[in-house]
Image (cartoon, rainbow, N blue to C red):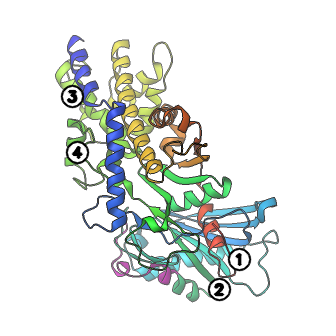
Amino acid sequence: MVKAVVVGAAVESSLATPTALLRSIADAMVAEMERGLRGDIHAQLKMLISYVDSLPTGDEHGLFYALDLGGTNFRVLRVQLGGKEKRVVKQQYEEVSIPPHLMVGTSMELFDFIAAALAKFVGTEGEDFQLPEGRQRELGFTFSFPVNQTSISSGTLIKWTKGFSINGTVGEDVVSELSRAMERQGLDMKATALVNDTVGTLAGGRYMDTDVVAAVILGTGTNAAYVEHANAIPKWTGLLPKSGKMVINTEWGSFKSNKLPLSEYDKAMDFESLNPGEQIYEKMISGMYLGEIVRRILLKLAHEASLFGDVVPPKLELPFILRTPDMSAMHHDSSHDLKTLGAKLKDIVGVADTSLEVRYITRHICDLVAERAARLAAAGVYSILKKIGRDKVPSGGGKMPRTVVALDGGLYEHYKKFSSCVEATLTDLLGEEASSSVVAKLANDGSGIGAALLAASHSQYQYGASD
């Protein structure tokens, strides 16, 4: 095992993220954010303008719907809002699977299927939900595919991803497609907000806590959205919004920089991926990839240090055989003989009996990969706080205002050692004084209520909505 220790030490140094390095990564990310806001075509962060200039305040009243389309299932939701006192009076949702043939069919077939499910859901409203006389039902539409947004309620599809391939829709306004399908179903409903899922999480977070300034998703993928001063967006050419604010969708997964400590494992994984050279930051920190990085390191230890004996386990050669939930289960094993970890290695890699030392080495690798990801994610959160001036106590004295970051995503919610490390690193980067005003808060918007809240704050019947 001496060889394993030597190789292990090399792995450890290649995954190191000293605090000084995290600071320089955050500075590089702030510079990229500024380039994106200027509209520089070479900027790595798109810094998309969401057209959301008024976030929910808690005063919203009435019945609102949401539709969340982001993969092979979609969700329809309704919520009855009762203002500051009653908040969310009642909510109901339904999940619908999309038949595989519709994912590769025509735009009309797909949207007709969605509108029919929506019409059926509206038909089950019940008397707990009240629509004022003479009003049209309103809908927030979460559409988690790349879109070129043109207003709060319109945007053209750039490309389908996640197994969808429908010719007719690219370049079309997805809200118009949905609206026409609703008309064909005889459904009188208006889509008043088209939102990205991260922007929806920000809206849901702000509704629950008025000090929320940013939302970060750490799940299978990663992204962040935050509230920017409209006058800090040089590429914005329209009238400045009344609120003076604008929600920006950073699309930060695409960040790359020579400051990011790419190891040989990252480079090899990226080279063999479906999108080489793209989404580099996402590949270092998100749930889709962490288990795979661990697998690649274990494979190297198997080849160069006979970690699993003289024969390299064949299953260990298979990309993505080790998933991040399995990595998390191994990492969280605190039993004296690491029994869970041993069972996982047997199930996944096919190694029946591993020594305690091998189990400890495996757990240490999980720890290194998760810690690096969490520290890099914290540097991203820190860069947003830096961009909006919430990273330090005001120079003229006084206390920094309470600043809340809403976090969502399975990786953050379920991988406890990861989330604890994100929070500890953020505290370290901010320093004692500033970190006492910053709160990282789990804002589980799994239901997609954020989109319904944005439909409410951008309602055609809303007058004088404030930020």
Residue drawn at x 38%, y 40% is: 376
Q: Amino acid at mark 2?
A: Asp
Q: In which quadrant of the rendered view does residue 292 lie?
A: top left
Observer-nearest residue: 77 or 426? 426
- Write down the residue under mark 3: 300
Whole-percent x and y of residue 397? Answer: 57, 42
Between disc 1 and disc 4, the foreground one is 4
Q: How many residues crowd mark 3 within 10 Å: few (<14), some (14–19), many (20+)?
A: some
Q: Nearer the viewer, residue 168 or 466?
A: 466
Q: Position of residue 17 (x, y in %)?
A: 33, 32
Q: Is residue 272 left or right of residue 427?
A: left
Q: Residue at x 41, y 44 (%)?
A: 287
Residue 99 visible somewhere in the drawing: no
133 on left or right of 393:
right
Which is more toward the observer, 27 or 339? 27
190 relative to 231, above or below: below
Mark 1–mark 3 Cα distance, whole angstroms, equals 58 Å
Q: Which residue is mark 1?
A: 123
Element class at badge 3 = helix
**Label 1 or label 3, whichever comes before in sequence order:** 1
